[in-house]
Image: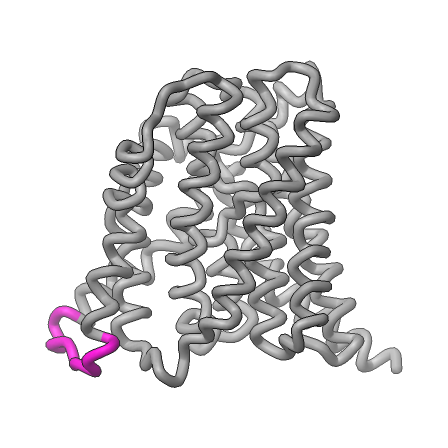
Amino acid sequence: MISEFLDTLEFSLSVTGPIFVILGLGGWLRRIGMINDAFIEVGSRLVFNVTLPALLFISVSKTHLDTSANFSLIGFGIAATLLAWGASELLARLAVRAPRDRGVVVQGVFRSNMAIIGLAYCVNAYGDAGMAAASLYVGLVTIVFNILAVISLSTSLHASQNVGQVLRSVALNPLIIGIVLALPISIAGLRLPGIVIQSGEYFARMTLPLALLCTGAALDFRSLREDPRDAVLAAAGKLVAVPLLFVLGGIALGFRGMDLGILLLMSSAPSAAAGYVMVRAMGGNAVLAANIIALTTVGSLFFTSAGIVVLKSMGLM
């Protein structure tokens, strides 16, 4: 019994431990001056616009959709996201005092950093199979994230963004473009030239280490001391309520093994770093958005580890 628990704990730490190390390394390199604001900005742009789309393109193009794509899992992920968004909207109206901050809290609760930390969790847990299964999930659920985030922030900030502008921002999202370009190749079963695969994989392998270094270097907990209430509220929703919704719903619908693991790992990933950029661009409370990201990034490592231990000990993951 003790050996089984230790095996489960070892597996859990193998999923979250490397991410904790790289995040911590990013923070330490920032502290000693080897990483600065310019590196973080350029590195983050490079990841979002080039290396992460390349990773998703390579992964999806090499995936046989008829055997690897689990559309029931993706459908459930979208439905659960909509439910989490609706519940967080209600929570924000009841508990967040400043109306302008409600959209920031809402997106902090339902919007996960799936493309960086969620994918890293899945790769650590399941290897290439996890990457293949999670890539399409990330791409399609990310579309829903972007639309709902714009709706919540526009409503709370009284910003005017029409349907056309929302659809344009989704259509120009580099992650979506990477997946859309890869889908015809995957569906047709085409084999890309070796030079394209190898060049793309160079970028793909750069993605997670660079993204995690930049994320760790950008974490700043100093402003949490001023007014942590809304950030803590969002973190509790993101790290506890949302994973419970996804996992319990997934169990009820019969998801097991890697599918249930993906639901846990994606839903327990921290709030999306892209949320900070969106809040700042729309004139919202960027400090609150940064606090939520910082709190959930560190908290995710512990809550995800606990979730893995529970599901593995029950034989569900």
Identify the residue at the far right of this view. Answer: 1
At a point 24% along the width and 77% down the height, the residue shown is 187
219, 55: nearer the viewer: 55
In front here: 132 or 117?
A: 132
Q: Which residue is drawn at 41% across and 41% down?
A: 147
Q: Is residue 173 magenta?
A: no
In reply to whether residue 188 is colored magenta, the answer given is yes
Q: Is residue 276 above or below residue 26?
A: above
Question: Where the C terminus falls, by quadrant?
Answer: bottom right
Residue at 25% over, 45% down: 171
**Residue at (19% x, 80% y) in the render:** 188
Which quadrant of the figure has residue 135?
bottom left
Residue 164 position by quadrant: top left
Q: Indicate the position of residue 310 as horizontal and vertical percent values.
A: 78, 67
**Quadrant location, the N terminus:** bottom right
- Does the rendering let one see residue 133? yes
Q: In this view, does 170 lie to the left or right of 263?
A: left
Question: For the magenta stretch, what is the residue range?
Answer: 186-196
